[in-house]
Image (tube, rainbow, N blue to C red):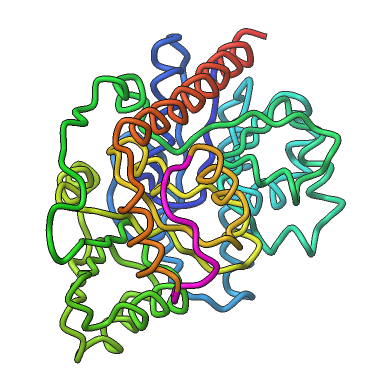
Amino acid sequence: MKIALLFPNNKYTAPYLKYYIDILANQEVEFDLYTWNRSNTEEDECIAFNNNSSNRNPFSLIKDYINFKNFLIKNLKKNNYNSIIVFSCQLGIFLKPFLEKKYRDNYILDIRDYSTTISYFKNRFSNLVSNASEVFISSEGFKEWLPKEKEYIMSHNLDSKLLSNHRNTNVEKEYFNRKPLNIDTIGAIRDFESNMSIIDTLKNNENFYLNFYGEGNAASLLRRNTKNINNVSFHGYYKKKDELPLLKETDFINIILNDNTQSKFLTSNRLYLSALLKIPCIIIEKNIEQFKIVQKYNLGIIVKNSNEIPLKIEKFIGSFNQTEYVKNCLLFLDKVKKDQEIFNQKIIQFINK
């Protein structure tokens, strides 16, 4: 058995690749990981297509995808793999004719986000999904825009080692005992409007301090628009291993996103961090999938808009029951762990079929 993993970005951008790599290694399966080196960074243990694709022009991006597709097909034909694991809707759409011809019912499609490419290739995408042996998704909310006839398996964006020890995480902490309260955003800072709305609501308020950990498309613009605000800090890029320590003094994790198709139905990495570290989150109603989870397990504060944050925080703290809150975090993570066990079983079945 020899398997190819096809990922259209740098390896470091996707910690979830490790889920597959660990299982394949444990099952002693030979595999190759093909990546698209977009950031001109040398990475170990992968076969890279070197193309620094920073151009956002859609025509240039399509051309780059075609070149990446050709690179992959050339190597797949040369190495004669038994099975394929394809990451992302976009790459799957570009590879669909080849997959249908050579690997029908013998490839996994892993979906971690929505792509506008789907709206232009609806039939091709539908066939891509139906011809896959398995389709893994990182949010139940994706079923709202995915073809209805397929069975989908959850694959959560949470480190397996952290998840396996989630009931051993130290929760002996004092809540809301500092002033100002730290409301922190961690990860990719992609959306200007949603983050700026929080800043505008809480700017120069002595009761709150806003920390932003990470970089992204919106980070530089947010910095420029907050120069005269004294309770906001941008800390820039961080290493994944530092993620948990950075949140040591956090009172609330901000998970307010915009209301596009992607954000409405995704489950943010920050939600897992919130539950794992027992830090209440702040989400907005229009992020439908996160709304369902936070409401069901009472994991934090739900607002209709950013203006409600100060009053909602006051009410939340006033009725906060630490024992119940920690219990709810553990119940949510128990569900995640069960889902991951099913995911692991499905990959092993795929390898052995």
Q: Name above or below for residue 155 compared with residue 188.
A: above
Of residues 260 and 200, the one drawn nearer to the viewer in this rendering: 200
Q: Quadrant of the C terminus?
A: top right
Q: Quadrant of the N terminus?
A: top right
Q: Quadrant of residue 126?
A: top right
47 with respect to 112 (left or right): left
Q: Residue at x 20, y 52 (%)?
A: 176
* Residue 269: percent from left, percent from top: 42, 46
Q: Residue at x 40, y 11 (%)?
A: 26
Magenta residues (range): 298-307
Q: Residue at x 40, y 40 (%)?
A: 272
Question: In the image as oriented, which residue stretches furthest toward the bottom?
Answer: 228
151 with respect to 324 (left or right): right
Asked if the magenta segment contains residue 140, the reply would be: no
Q: Residue at x 32, y 24 (%)?
A: 166
Q: Name above or below for residue 159 compared with residue 41.
A: above
**What is the tally of numbered marks visible in this picture?**
0
